[in-house]
Image (cartoon, helix red, strand yellow):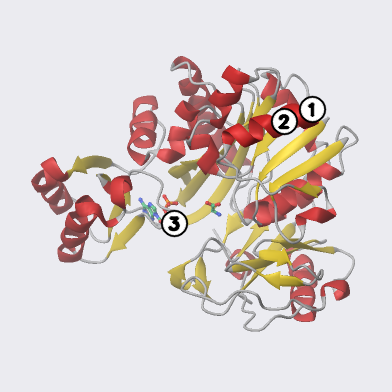
């Protein structure tokens, strides 16, 4: 098969690494890719949102399958575009109607509520219903959770400690704080617990496979302090996502989700990412995403021993049948090296050295990197490289990733030394 992978982050590096190992993969293109994805396939300078160029490229090269890494092209309708223009090309990812599970928080909440899927109590408001929104806030207890309805580059969720701040933020959001994305705001009850990410590959016809469960570390600072980032590291498995917890996830969340999509005639053949929170042993949905997680994928891919291309192609054809998803018992972790200043402003173009010293057992998945004209690898983003390792234990895997991250250098390198520590100390 000829495969085109869309995206340019650490997630796409990990997907490219995994795809390139498949005996079914005859040729892999990554658009636009980054300074490391060319180890696994051919980078193509093309935007994931430029559907016409992608269509031309796919026709020219005889691409059989498109794997969509990030949500933007899905929300913009890439699956629908190809279904209409080139129905023989497989697309791994939902239709725009399905991608609304991530693209509209209001839709996702309405969907969950109508299916009885456990999630925080909520209501949605617009500028016209601001007063009702303020009144609804009065019925909740602090802290207050406000979410922009639309995509806001991961920044659209505000958690406010006081009712005054919550009301002020509601006014600002409805007044255009996130442009059109916050023209509708979801206000919801605050849930307290530990989060985890569950990934499901579905064929849209009732078939699905659960991928390894992971936990990501969102805050910049150790001990989960400071502002949110795209993610500073991840570990898999997650100790509390045991058989009992996952049985609840299946029956209360995954199966109703898949049934709900089918009942609404929504085409969904691809990954569903359930952002869950464990509230006293009960899984509740914080959010849906319609793609794999970043940096979770950089750990999750290391634990999949079966052929992911076979599984993705079967899902995209609408029939997972008895396709296997074989998962290793060995844990995997990823630790992200980031630029000084991230998630605020940071400099780019810093020379990255020592990549050749990364030992066996660790993979340096490039995220924000690029190659210069003379072949040097330099930083080009906030999250620079995800150092991913599998080990006999989480500590063992972390030891390998930390050793690798120490061997590689660039000016201003920063990372969290406490990835996974909360799970190592976790008691029920
Ligand atoms: P989201 O963009 O929906 O993933 O929200 C970002 C983060 O905000 C989540 O990962 C949670 O840590 C937090 N969050 C969102 N909704 C809630 C909630 N209802 N209760 C507590 N924390 C929440
Ligand atoms: N790691 C969270 C996300 O990809 O949205």
Is residue 189 visible to us here? no
Q: Distance between the residues labelled 2 and 1?
A: 6 Å
- Crowd around label 2: few <14 · some 14–19 · many ≥20 (10 Å): some
Q: Where is residue 203 in the image (x, y as percent from the top left)?
A: 64, 23
Disc 3 is placed on an element classified as loop
Image x and y of residue 19, in percent: 80, 42
Q: Select label 2 or label 3 by which is in front.
A: 2
Which quarter of the rendered image does ligand 1 occupy?
A: bottom left
User: Disc 2, disc 1: CB below 8 Å?
Assistant: yes
State the mark number for residue 58: 2
The CA distance from mark 2 to mark 3 is 45 Å
Q: Nearer the viewer, residue 108 or 398?
A: 108
Q: Earlier along the polypeptide chain: callout 2 or callout 3?
A: 2
Query: Is 199 or 152 nearer to us in this picture?
Result: 152
Q: Relative to the observer, which residue lies in front, 246 or 346?
A: 346
What residue lies at 24% left-to-right and 40% top-to-bottom? Answer: 124
Can residue 109 be seen in the rendering of this structure? yes
Secondary element under disc 2, as helix, strand or loop, is helix
Tag nearer the camera, 3 or 1: 1
Disc 3 marks which residue? 193
Q: How far apart are marks 3 and 1 (CA)?
A: 48 Å
Quarter occupied by the C terminus: bottom right
Q: Residue 373 vs residue 347: left or right?
A: right
- Nearer the observer, 57 or 129: 57
Q: Residues within 10 Å of mark 3 (few under 14, many from 20)?
A: some
The residue that label 1 is drawn on is 62
N-term-proximal mark, 3 vs 1: 1
Instruction: Check disc 1 and report its element: helix, strand or loop.
Output: loop
The dot on residue 42 is none
């Amino acid at each position: 098969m000829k495969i085109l992978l869309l995206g340019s982050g650490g997630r796409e590096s990990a997907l490219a690494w995994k795809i390139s190992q498949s005996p079914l993969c005859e040729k892999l293109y990554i658009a636009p890719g980054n300074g490391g994805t060319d180890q696994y396939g051919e980078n193509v300078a093309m935007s994931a949102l430029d559907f016409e160029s992608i269509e031309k490229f796919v026709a020219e090269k005889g691409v059989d399958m498109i794997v969509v890494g990030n949500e933007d092209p899905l929300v913009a309708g890439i699956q629908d575009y190809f279904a209409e223009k080139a129905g023989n090309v497989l697309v791994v990812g939902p239709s725009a109607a399905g991608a609304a599970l991530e693209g509209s928080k209001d839709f996702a909440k309405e969907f969950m509520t109508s299916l009885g899927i456990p999630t925080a109590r909520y209501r949605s408001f617009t500028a016209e219903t601001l007063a009702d929104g303020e009144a609804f806030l009065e019925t909740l207890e602090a802290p207050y959770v406000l979410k922009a309805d639309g995509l806001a580059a991961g920044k659209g969720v505000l958690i406010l400690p006081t009712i005054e701040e919550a009301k002020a933020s509601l006014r600002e959001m409805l007044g255009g704080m996130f442009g059109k994305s916050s023209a509708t705001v979801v206000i919801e009850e605050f849930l307290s617990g530990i989060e985890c990410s569950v990934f499901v590959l579905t064929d849209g016809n009732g078939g699905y496979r659960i991928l390894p469960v992971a936990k990501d570390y969102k805050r910049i600072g150790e001990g989960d302090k400071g502002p949110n980032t795209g993610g500073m590291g991840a570990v898999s498995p997650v100790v509390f996502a045991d058989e009992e917890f996952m049985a609840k996830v299946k029956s209360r969340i995954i199966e109703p989700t898949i049934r709900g999509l089918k009942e609404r005639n929504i085409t969904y053949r691809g990954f569903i990412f359930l952002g869950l929170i464990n509230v006293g042993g009960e899984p509740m949905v914080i959010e849906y995403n319609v793609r794999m997680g970043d940096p979770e994928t950089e750990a999750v891919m290391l634990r999949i021993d079966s052929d992911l291309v076979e599984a993705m192609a079967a899902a995209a054809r609408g029939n997972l049948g008895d396709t296997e998803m074989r998962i290793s018992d060995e844990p995997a972790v990823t630790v992200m090296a980031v630029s000084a200043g991230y998630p605020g402003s940071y400099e780019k173009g810093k020379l990255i050295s020592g990549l050749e010293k990364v030992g066996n057992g660790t993979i340096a998945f490039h995220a924000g990197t690029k190659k210069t004209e003379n072949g040097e690898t330099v930083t080009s983003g906030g999250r620079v490289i995800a150092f991913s390792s599998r080990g006999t234990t989480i500590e063992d895997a972390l030891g390998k990733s930390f050793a690798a991250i120490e061997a590689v250098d660039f000016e201003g390198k920063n990372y969290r030394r406490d990835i996974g520590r909360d799970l190592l100390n976790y008691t029920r």
